[in-house]
Amino acid sequence: MLNKSTIKEVLDISLPAVGESICYTLMSIFDIMMIGNYGGSTAVNAVGISSEILNTCVNIFIVVGISIGITSFVSRSIGAQKKSSADEYASIGFLLGFIFSIFICCILFKFSRNILFWAGAKGNVLNVSNNFTKIAVVAVFFNMMTNVINSILRGYGNTYAPFLIAVFITVVKLLLDVILIFGIIVPELGIIGLAIASVGSQGVGFIAALIYFLKKSYVKIRFKYIFYLKISKVKNILLLSIPSSMEDAAFGLSKLLCTFIIMHSGNIAFASNQIANTIESISFMPGMGFGMAATTLVGIKVGEKNYKKAREYTYACALGAVLMMGFFSIVFLVMPGILVNLFIDEGEKRIIYLASLCLFIGAFEQPSIAISTVFASALKGAGDAKTPLVISLATSWIIRLPLIFYFIHFLKLSVIYVWWVTVIQWGIDAILMFICFEKKLGAKNRLYQ
């Protein structure tokens, strides 16, 4: 079913997207690693709970919200050879992304302490986390706008520029982290230094992305499309973006609520879960990268009404994601303790033990995450964001959240049960995504044969 040319096309678009995702994840991992070695479990908890909230907002409203809508419509316009339509969707998407980003950041800044308190942060953790969040919100704005620009570039198959921008941001961030957290050259700033480093790196990254976009992008922002908005085009983007946002919200908010449940069970459980999640997050990147490629490639082929090729691209993306994430499964099975020791002082033996067990269990969910991510992304590329939303609602709120609440809050069991629940959730999620994709694209393929 898969030929060499298909695999090559998929890899040409997927690998830079995977690299981009890995860069951002490594940046987060090194953040936790450095702040954990600097301030121990208290610092990990403060930065961890803030980062969970900020990243959830970015993902829900921009990364899998507005950005998915932009990529899908730009790619389908390119596939249908309607360059002016691609420009129009890019222009409207950029405006919507800017409005959403400003609004979200204002809310996060104004109500940061209330949100963190509701999340379970108390005492010194609450104070430190609030100070971190107030500064990091500025970085979030730049991050959101960079994602909007990248979504336009991906829409016509350009994943190399977002990758290079990610490399640039990561290098700047890590340099600033070392300088500002540990006081090299300047006074030691600790967690506040981490927040300032985020603002600096995301700011220069956004400027670099904007300059490249204005000078080099094939799809352009045209101010005439902003000044004379077509409500139908705005509605099209929102009708795809909102269900996509709600899908990630269904998963992200359930995950956030689970994080709050774990936090209420104690600092050791929370720190263990946070470290294991941080390490595991690197394994998600192939799934995200191949998912981005699936959205673009399926969108272009659906625009051409070539549904057979759209299915072929999706299967190639799924195979690549499963193979790469399967490699991480083996690593998590073989050396979880070694990985955890990189993030926390050797004296925190209970945290090291629990985090290692969580990571070991996480190995079993990697193939399911790969399949779910790619087939959900392919459905969105085809213009169907409602099906992934329904599936995510079901698996997150009917399976994940109730079971974790029962095991952790009522039975007071170990945090490792959280990870067994997610293994079950992702398995069911993957099966449902695959079935729904086959029903939609298979039917279209038979219709246009």
Image (tube, rainbow, N blue to C red):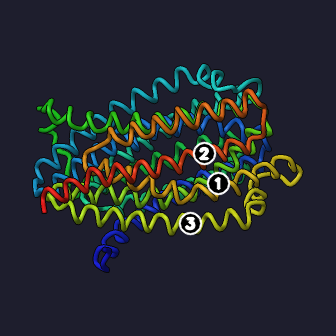
Q: Position of residue 358 (x, y in %)?
A: 71, 50
Whether residue 271 is situated above or below residue 235 in the rendered picture: below
Question: What is the three-letter code of the residue carrying label 3?
Answer: Gly
Where does the image place residue 210, in percent across and percent down from the top left?
33, 50
Look at mark 3 in the image and give the residue it sits on. 326
Residue at x 17% of width, y 59% of height: 446
> For the residue labelled by badge 3, is the local secondary structure a helix, a strand or a loop?
helix
Q: Quadrant of the N terminus?
A: bottom left
- Disc 1, SS: helix
Q: Earlier in the sequence, mark 3 or mark 2?
A: 3
Give the quadrant of the C terminus.
bottom left
Dot 2 corresponds to which residue?
A: 422
Q: CA distance from mark 3 to mark 2?
A: 17 Å
Query: Are the residues at dot 1 and dot 2 in contact (C-beta closer than 8 Å)?
Result: yes
Residue drawn at x 68%, y 54% is: 361
Can residue 333 be spotted in the picture? yes
The picture places residue 166, in percent across and down from the top left corner, at: 46, 57
Front residue (pair 442, 147): 442
